[in-house]
Image (cartoon, rainbow, N blue to C red):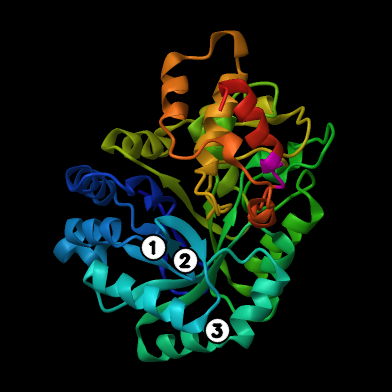
């Protein structure tokens, strides 16, 4: 494994990290398998935003006496409502869920306390006005939180937080599709070494964020590095061809301030596949030929992140979008298994009441209401 300085925190981060989301609702044996392989590979960064106690207890049990081998990003503001992810800016609620995270994991500290889903200026005002920032700062004084960070998909809001001095680390959505300008923008500058820091092909606002983080010593860990897998398929990639896992990792690791790429794993084999990056040649890492003629950003494409939840009529929006996207690849030959999975959903696209709350939460501008109606037409429900 290779390690980088995580900003000015004094911590070293493995360049390959671990997003634990895919362990949610998995049996303990699977959780233990993945955790064991993560530690064997020398991965020392974990993002744990899920509010459910079961997955957090499973992770804590699997870590056991090895807790100090991994640095955990724990969310402040991630809660659940009727078993669906939700966001809270209420101080007492945030306290309850964060303190239960410590209990569930069986630990007395979290390495990085992360303000969760900071995508709007309203969210920024709320964590300040409601005392959540002060709460995190007090926990840091007590040693319960070692460092304070945030997760965000919005470069403008993230940069505000950085420039206000609120953050020591940032988890941000980084991949070439998100970063590329619309049109046929050259990415030659993006292929330069870390030392050169040339960002001609990156949107100015995102480039400014990365540079501001580097300037202020705020280390970045990444999410959405594979674009929910869409970058790995020629059918769904916004580029002329699919990228490989290694190319996506390399793209993220060549942005300023980025220390670790947090990928999700549901099996030990997937951990090994991510870590294969460490053995790739420069030619195998090079994404230039694939991304050279970028047609634009992935704006409007669902990446199944679940930030749209909760739905007032309990639609699993990410699942509906995922099955819809798969069906649309070949409407004349929809796999029977996809039809079966869709039909097994508790609530389907046709039950959408078009309230719009999901679209307000979506960080990628997905037209969810239209997608729900389209899914209902495709699957007949």
Decide which of tag 1 and tag 3 comes sooner along the chain: 1
Residue 26 place in picture, x, y as percent: 27, 44
The crowding category of the residue bearing disc 1, from other C-alpha atoms within 10 Å (few below 14, some 14 to 19, many at least 20), is: many
Predominant secondary structure, magenta span: loop
Gap in angstroms between the C-alphas marked 1 and 3: 19 Å
Q: Residue at x 26, y 58 (%)?
A: 54
> What is the span of residues highlighted in magenta in the rendered image?
365-369
The furthest residue to the left: 65
Q: Residue at x 26, y 79 (%)?
A: 108
151 up-or-down from 345: above or below: below
Q: Is residue 48 left or right of residue 155?
A: left
Q: Where, quadrant-wise, is the C terminus in this rendering?
A: top right
234 vs 85, nearest the viewer: 85
Which element carries disc 3, helix, strand or loop?
helix
Which mark is on residue 51?
Answer: 1
* Res 317 → quadrant: top right
Which element carries disc 1, helix, strand or loop?
loop
Instruction: Tell me the mark number nearer the camera, choosing from 1 and 3.
Output: 1
Residue 88 place in picture, x, y as percent: 52, 71
Decide which of tag 3 and tag 2 comes sooner along the chain: 2
Residue beneath label 2, please? 78
Q: Residue at x 41, y 86 (%)?
A: 139
Gap in angstroms between the C-alphas marked 2 and 1: 6 Å
Do the residues under discs 2 and 1 have CB atoms within 8 angstroms?
yes
32 up-or-down from 229: above or below: below
> Is any atom of residue 32 visible in this view?
yes
Residue 253 place in picture, x, y as percent: 55, 48
Residue beneath label 3, please? 133
Decide which of tag 2 and tag 1 comes sooner along the chain: 1
The crowding category of the residue bearing disc 3, from other C-alpha atoms within 10 Å (few below 14, some 14 to 19, many at least 20), is: some
């Amino acid at each position: 494994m290779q390690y980088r300085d995580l900003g000015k925190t004094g911590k070293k981060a493995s360049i390959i990290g671990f997003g634990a989301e895919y362990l949610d609702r998995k049996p303990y044996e699977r959780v233990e398998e993945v955790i064991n392989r993560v530690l064997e590979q020398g991965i020392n960064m974990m993002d744990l935003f899920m509010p459910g106690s079961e997955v957090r207890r499973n992770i804590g049990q699997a870590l056991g006496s090895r807790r100090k081998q991994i640095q955990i990003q724990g969310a402040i503001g991630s809660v659940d409502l009727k078993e669906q992810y939700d966001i809270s800016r209420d101080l007492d609620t945030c306290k309850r869920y964060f303190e239960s995270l410590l209990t569930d994991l069986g630990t007395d500290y979290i390495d990085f306390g992360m303000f969760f889903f900071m995508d709007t200026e309203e969210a920024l005002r709320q964590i300040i006005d409601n005392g959540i920032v002060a709460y995190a700062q007090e926990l840091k004084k007590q040693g319960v939180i070692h460092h304070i960070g945030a997760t965000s998909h919005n470069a403008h809001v993230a940069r505000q937080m950085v420039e206000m001095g609120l953050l020591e680390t940032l988890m941000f959505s980084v991949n070439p599709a998100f970063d590329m300008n619309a049109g046929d923008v050259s990415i030659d500058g993006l292929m330069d070494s870390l030392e050169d820091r040339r960002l001609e092909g990156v949107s100015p606002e995102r480039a400014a964020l990365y540079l501001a983080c580097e300037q202020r010593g705020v280390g970045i860990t990444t999410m959405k590095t594979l674009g929910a897998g869409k970058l790995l398929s020629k059918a769904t990639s916004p580029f002329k061809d699919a990228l490989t896992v290694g190319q996506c990792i390399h793209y993220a690791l060549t942005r300023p301030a980025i220390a670790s790429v947090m990928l999700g794993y549901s099996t030990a084999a997937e951990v090994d596949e991510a870590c294969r990056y460490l053995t790739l040649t420069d030619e195998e890492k090079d994404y230039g030929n694939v991304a050279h003629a970028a047609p634009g950003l992935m704006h409007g494409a669902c990446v199944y992140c679940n930030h749209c939840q909760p739905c007032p009529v309990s639609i699993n929006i990410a699942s509906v979008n995922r099955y819809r996207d798969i069906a649309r690849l070949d409407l004349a030959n929809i796999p029977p298994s996809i039809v079966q999975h869709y039909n097994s959903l508790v609530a389907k696209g046709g039950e959408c009441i078009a309230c719009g709350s999901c679209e307000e939460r979506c960080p990628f501008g997905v037209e969810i209401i239209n997608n729900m109606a389209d899914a209902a037409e495709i699957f007949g429900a």
